[in-house]
Image (cartoon, helix red, strand yellow):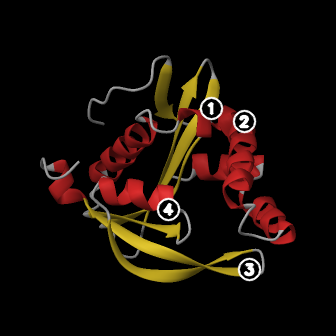
Amino acid sequence: MTERALPAASVIRRARRSDAGALSDFAVRLFRDTYSGDTAASDLESYIDEHFSAEHQAAEIDDPSAAVFVATADDLIIGYAHVVMRPADGRSALLNRIYVDAGWRGRGLAGGLLDAVVGEAGQRGAAHLELTVFERNSRALAFYKRVGFAAIGSTTFMVGEDPQTDVVMRLDLIGRLNGGPA
């Protein structure tokens, strides 16, 4: 992980199994806040039930092909990131989630979480990092472009029964880890 000035009193660390319940609560809150305006409540709740239970979070934390990082302040989760190595080729990783509490946005926390993910993926031999982001999430799209991701296509992302369009983006890790664009 590269040095990055983080907001005062915040720490980024690898998630522990004991974080699963708090991580579940945090993820549910942020997912609802971010997507409730674009998604029917039943579809939103269906997705939340499937992907954000404490058991699901514990499984993601325990997964040896993945890494979960949490950002905390005063022992409260204020952000997190989840990256998964893709076994098909062993040279790519998927940034599955990066969430930052609204009160902490614009303070370098997303960049710090991304640095942790990039470091982890690089250590595991990934050449590039991919992600998908909802086409209407302009704040996230702007952040990813600013840090060097490039749009390479689109895909359908199901939230419950609601098909949504996500932009597929890729970051060259070799260039980034060798001093390329940050």
Expressed as whole percent of the image width and height from the top left, the position of residue 89 reads 33, 74
Is residue 157 left or right of 50 when viewed as pictured? left
Res. 138 mark: 4
Mark 1 falls on what kind of element?
Answer: strand
Residue at mark 3:
162
N-terminal label among 1 and 3:
1
The N terminus, quarter of image: top left
Task: Report how far apart the C-alphas of labels 1 and 3 lie in the structure.
Answer: 29 Å
Say whether marks 1 and 2 touch (CB < 8 Å): yes
Amino acid on which the number 3 mark rests in the picture: Asp
The one nearer the camera, 91 or 129, is 129
Amino acid on which the number 1 mark rests in the picture: Ile
Check disc 2: other Cα within 10 Å, few if <14, some if 14-19, many if 20+: some
Is residue 175 left or right of 17 when viewed as pictured? left
Mark 2 falls on what kind of element?
Answer: helix
Res. 173 mark: none
Q: Which marked residue is nearer to the observer: mark 2 or mark 4?
A: 4
Say whether marks 2 and 4 touch (CB < 8 Å): no
Res. 22 mark: 2
Residue at mark 1:
77
Residue at x 45%, y 18% (from the top left corner): 8
- Which residue is farthest right? 42
Is residue 96 left or right of 124 when viewed as pictured? right
Task: Report how far apart the C-alphas of labels 1 and 2 lie in the structure.
Answer: 7 Å
